[in-house]
Image (tube, coloured by chain):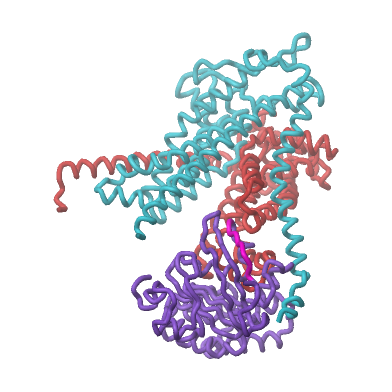
Chain colours: A cyan, B purple, C red
Amino acid sequence: MTDVAHAADRRDLAWWVDRAVQILVLAGGLSAIVFIAGIFVFITREGAGFVFDRFDFREFFFSPRWTPTSSHNPTYGALALIAGTASVTGLAMVVSVPFSLGAAVYIGEFATGRVRETLKVLVELLAAIPSVVWGFIGLSIMNPLIIQIFDVPIGLNVLNSGIILGLMAAPIMTTIAEDALKAVPDTYREAAEAMGATRWQVTFKVVLPAARNGLVAATLLGVGRGFGETMAVLMASGHSINLPTSPFDSVRALTATIAAELGETAAGSDHYQALFTLGIFLFLVTFAINFAADVFVRGGQRKHRRRGRRPAASANP
Amino acid sequence: MTSPAPGRAAGDYAVEVEDLAIRYHGKPALSGVTFQVRRNEIFGIIGPANSGKTSFLRAINRMDLMTAGMEVSGSVRVEGRDVRSWRNPYALRQRIGVVFPLPVGLPLTIYDNVALSSRLRGTRRKADLDVIVERCLRRAALWDEVKDRLDSLGSLLSGGQQQRLTIARALSQDPSILLLDEFSIAVDPVTTMRIEEVLAELRSEMTIVLVTNLVQQARRLAARTAFFLTGELVEVTETETMFEGGAQDPRTTAYVEGKFG
Amino acid sequence: MFEATAQNRRNRKVEGLFRLLFLWMTCMLILPVALVLGVLIVRGGPAISWEFLFSPPTNGMTAGGILPALVGTVWLVVVALIASVPVGVAAALYLSEYAPDNRLTRAINLAIINLAGVPSIVHALFGVGAFVIFFRFGTSILAASLTLAVMTLPVVIVATRESLQTVPLAFREACWNMGATRWQTIRKIVLPNSISGILTGVILEVSRTSGETAPIMFTGAAFFLPFLPQGVLDQTMAMSLHLFVISTQVPDVPEHMPFGVALVLISMVLAMNGISIAFRVYLRGRKKW
């Protein structure tokens, strides 16, 4: 019999094919790492000249003067752009976080069956609307509305782009938050309900605290989404470099600056490299946000896995 | 301990296990197990849940390669050869048929379920496959029930039928060893009886390792039986001796008499 | 025992209020979709005609149709799919079927999350630096589509991986136990039972790709080209950029035109999403085990 076994133990075609496929799909998996590294390498390559020769930390972060096209004294202060991005994203979050989390609670904890499925589909459709269409809506629908309602001279401002950005960031927050609620084991809810708590008491006292990490992650991803949005902000924020003092001020965001100016710069010029430097900054900040969100998501999952097991173990003496 | 038991040559054993230990993510599931399974015997393994029976079966056909966190130490020899010395573990698994606790009809037609193994090994001719499919389904006592609907989905058969389909599929590998893991757990008593009859017939052609949750099933079928308890091998004894109160360890007697487990 | 005490009644009232509040919040998110669609249909609808869809723009883009932009978007999407689907499916197969739980796998997952999270304008910068300049593709469909492909890769990977995971582990184990290799198991059991889910993901990617603007602005999409692209090294117009251009860059465009373009664009995108959702519902209803 041993001889039979030896005869059978050949690395046949199937074995080699499997090995080849394994290498091929590993290459596919690695490509994600290659691309993310490639993004960093290539934008750094284009922006490096500026970062090493011209970059002035104080000017970049503390001066609101972004005048790259000035012929005698170009300045590259990104403070106003950062403020623009921050104000728009901030307002978007103020508008969007409560509604997104509220919607997640409704879809995850209250709605059932067909209603629930329909709502999820609608949220998905909300996510599908392209950002350029949102920008167009800000430009052609929201703009006149804001002028009319608030009696201001221009409707392309923090308020306009904040609302739009809020709507754009809502689906991802709702989806991730609902996932986090779903991850809370049913045993928690049943235990609380058995003690006579009502649905909303269960939701507020048990489910939301247990899902806290996931909700933080959802908010972070929403911030990341708003922070990086380009077209909608470009079209709806008024596009003027400004340290905003009210929601009715026009601003200019980091992303919009790149989109608006890159086409008019000569490759390799200071201005061109400065725009890539803004890109590096955007990349690093979103990387940090996504990384943090991932840590929170994982933390949430681990917690439930640990806690979720305990009752099962005690039920089996 | 490497030398075979007195009076028997190495070739007489289908499976030889020596100082086998299995861990999942560092947590031990089974340790210090040493025994032999003779060729063409039905070898029973009994023991309560979580005693390491399934882990033992998974070590025999090298499922540790496919299972995250599963580590095997010690040695398992199949037909005299250490399973870890196989350069092509897939070829090893082809020689070992496996039947699971919950029947797994693959989402293919009944015909394709049974023909799959032969096809993977390169048999293409319809006539050859027809012969194999009919033979295996007949031996698994399923042919009469499904011969008119071989092209319906195997995964939609009833539990008992799916379990016999799983056995037919295992037989289509033409295995020298058949591992059964609590096959009757989701099967009605009548089907269980029919499968037990099938196993008794198969004994002349292959070695059968029967892990079972029913001690009486081991008694009906197995020549010798091992008792596993919480990750350890308590003893291996002739089945009759074990059930007649001749077990070496009092825990074995207590278990077969239904005092715990 | 079931007597309604005052406490009980109050609880029920509060519960009802909360329910209503959350429902209202949900509706506030969903209502805009309906409003936007309604406005676009009312104001863009009159612009739509055979001539609008199938003729090039004229008079400095203040009249005529959108044919080159429509065709250009199809080019961009098709080339992007050819580049990203094989890579994405391979990556998903690796993560779902082969990857051990180790540092490399975690790094790949983190990279995917970040690819999805990097701002689209940064993807555009990457496209300029890598495809336009370094690989010398110039501003072309190829450069733009590859940029889109990298950007939407996570969509394919995540959808494919989810679809692969719906095939129960027991099927894989049964196959492995018969001596099937991992690849044989994938080919015979896993892929046939997840291919429709993968297709759903691809449709979603089409939807996503056709609406993107920033990544193609500097890599291959042109403001105005009166002719259709002949190959992947040509520049092209695109629906999304066309909407941006005629609504912000070109003076004296009659109002119905950008609304018409927006309506066509959003119809394409929502149709794709609709197909993908319908497909999913159909799949859920069909039971194979």
Q: Position of residue B117 (x, y in %)?
A: 66, 77
C187 vs B258, nearest the viewer: B258
On screen, A199 above or below A50? below
Instruction: Report the residue at 71% width, 53% height from top.
Output: A26
The answer to whether residue B75 is magenta is yes
Q: Residue at x 71, y 40 (%)?
A: C64
In which quadrant of the rendered image does the C terminus of chain A lie? bottom left
Q: Find residue A174 and report its horizontal and vertical position in percent.
A: 47, 42
Q: Magenta segment, which residues?
A: B69-76
Seen in the picture, residue B91 relative to A280 is either above or below; the reply is below
| In this picture, residue A86 sits left or right of residue A57 | left
| Residue depicted at 65% across the width and 18% down the height | A78
Across and down, in percent, residue B146 comes to 54, 86
* Residue B166, quarter of the rendered image: bottom right
Q: Is residue B177 visible?
A: yes
Compared across the picture, whether A100 is left or right of C200 comes to left
On the question of residue C265 being in view, the answer is: no
